Amino acid sequence: MFSEDEIKKVILSSSILTEDVLTVNAKAAASKGIELGKYLVENKVVGENVLYEALANSKKIPFIDLRDQTIRKDILTLLPEPISQKHQIVAFAKDDHEVKIATLDPYNIQLFEFIKKKTGLNVEVSLTSPTGIKAALAQYHKGLSAEFKKITSGEETADSQDEDKEKDLKKLAHDLPIVRIVDTLLEYAIFENASDIHIEPTEKETVVRYRVDGILRDAMTLPKSAHAGIIARIKVLSSLKIDEHRLPQDGRFKVSTQEHKIAFRVSILPVFDGEKVVLRLLNESAHVLTLEQLGMQPKALLAVKDALDKPHGILLVTGPTGSGKTTTLYTMLNILNTSDVNISTVEDPIEYRMPRVNQSQVNPKIGFTFANGLRSLLRQDPDIIMVGEIRDNETAEIAANAAMTGHLVLSTLHTNDAPSSLPRLSEMGIPSFLIASTTNLIIAQRLVRKICPHCILSYTLSKKAISELSRQFDVPMILMTLEREGTILSAKAPLESLLFYRGKGCKQCNNSGYKGRIGIYEALVVSKKMSELILNNASTEEIRQAAIKEGMITMLQDGFIKAKNGMTSIEEVIRVTKE
């Protein structure tokens, strides 16, 4: 691989950056522990292809852009997928005398010699970019339809598994085609970064859907005759009762590979046409994000850091299911997790393991509820407590009293926005003085899909779109916020003159125009003025207006800032913020 000194030398000799700019970025990369090349590309200081072309020229080898190149199957499979994945190398062309390979590491002479012996051909080495390698490696996955055609084309097919009631379900769960179908469903879900897999029985078939970037989409339709075997296989993996078909069941299992360590949370529910399974994917090998990576605006970021510096009080994260609340809580816990504090949590379920954090999981069947768990935690000499969710009056009251007696309490609440959380706590029976004196900060959030960087396009809004936006939102207020945050030069600029962005749709994003997700936030600081309003039982609207006067950026405004900066689209912001 290229050393940092080599990259610096190539950048300067190719006049890609000046020495001053390079020095500043090298220091920033070093402070964050990121490789220089990766840092420059991720922060858009240098184009990825520009950098790797310059590196290729310095080694006097060709550069190949594999991002949109389709590689013939017989050429691609000259190298087994595990070798390609491990060494980040692919074969992309060949003739009778030579095989052309693309790599990120032109120094791996030993591997090139191995390929030469294996194929009996001369090897021509080209350099490509990390994105190019990723796109080429994706071509090993033929697509679910082709994979299932292959699985079910043998003599012992899934169709041959008729729903014979007398057939031993345990045996069915271990039949090779069923095992391969389930393994392939899980493998493709991991490959596509799905957060959930839905396996749904209908009258005549079984529908498999993946939730990717928050949106459910059909992945596969299977014969109904395979359904009993698939369910049995998942029950075996999750250590559930195979012969129980009338009651819901919950379980868990793990899949570990060289690249991934994924926990699958399983929920089985009897429905009219059979049993429906939903598997939630939890990536245990994923790194905990930083507050900056979550995508918070500078003011919200500062408010969170100030709240985390306080020795006691309540910090709430609010939003609907699937809005990223747990990720935000874990990010905060990771910042607080030092050797001089005792952190204890009570969760439902424990989604990610954190070293040195005492995590416990509720179990209502045996009376271990959030309220009982929280009472027990308070006898464990904690400094910081995380409660998965405040669901009832009892939990809310214990949390507020814990904050009052010198503990920092982190938790989640189900409300639409930050201002409505304060009246919600009152409705739960917590006295106003307790809310006013213990609550430090409330963060509301949603997740929006990010525009695919490979097919992003700019456009201006049509008159019809502007008219529709003006009907739904306070556009002058949004423009004033954009000006205040330095996103646009003037709030007086006509909306039709501003550039916004969307994704055209390409192979990289499965023609959706989106790839990945980012949060939009509003952070309500409970200031002296806010405390007075709480004591006077102010309405949600009064609290909202006071918070905006004190500088709170609403989720909608944060969404428009991110839309104007090309991170997401206006349509996506409207989709997740509409009530």
Image (cartoon, rainbow, N blue to C red):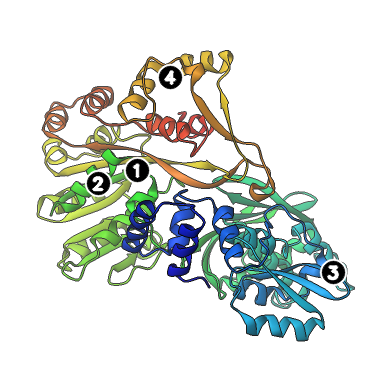
Choose top left, top right, bottom left or bottom right for residue 24. bottom left
Do the CB atoms of the residues marked 3 and 2 lie less than 8 Å apart? no
Q: Amino acid at mark 3?
A: Thr
Residue 454 is left or right of residue 539, and the answer is right
Do the CB atoms of the residues marked 2 and 1 lie less than 8 Å apart? yes
- Secondary structure beneath dot 2 equals helix
- Secondary structure beneath dot 3 equals loop
State which tag comes first along the sequence, 4 or 2.
2
Q: Position of residue 358 (x, y in %)?
A: 28, 69
Q: Which residue: 41% across, 52% down?
A: 18
Q: Amino acid at mark 1?
A: Met
Do the CB atoms of the residues marked 1 and 4 lie less than 8 Å apart? no
State which tag comes first along the sequence, 4 or 3.
3
Residue 222 is left or right of residue 256, and the answer is right
Crowd band around label 3 with a 10 angstrom C-alpha radius: few (<14), some (14–19), many (20+): some
Q: Position of residue 470 (x, y in %)?
A: 46, 15
Choose top left, top right, bottom left or bottom right for residue 117. bottom right
Identify the disc placed on residue 157.
Answer: 3
Identify the disc placed on residue 296.
Answer: 1
Identify the disc placed on residue 304.
Answer: 2
Choose top left, top right, bottom left or bottom right for residue 406. bottom left
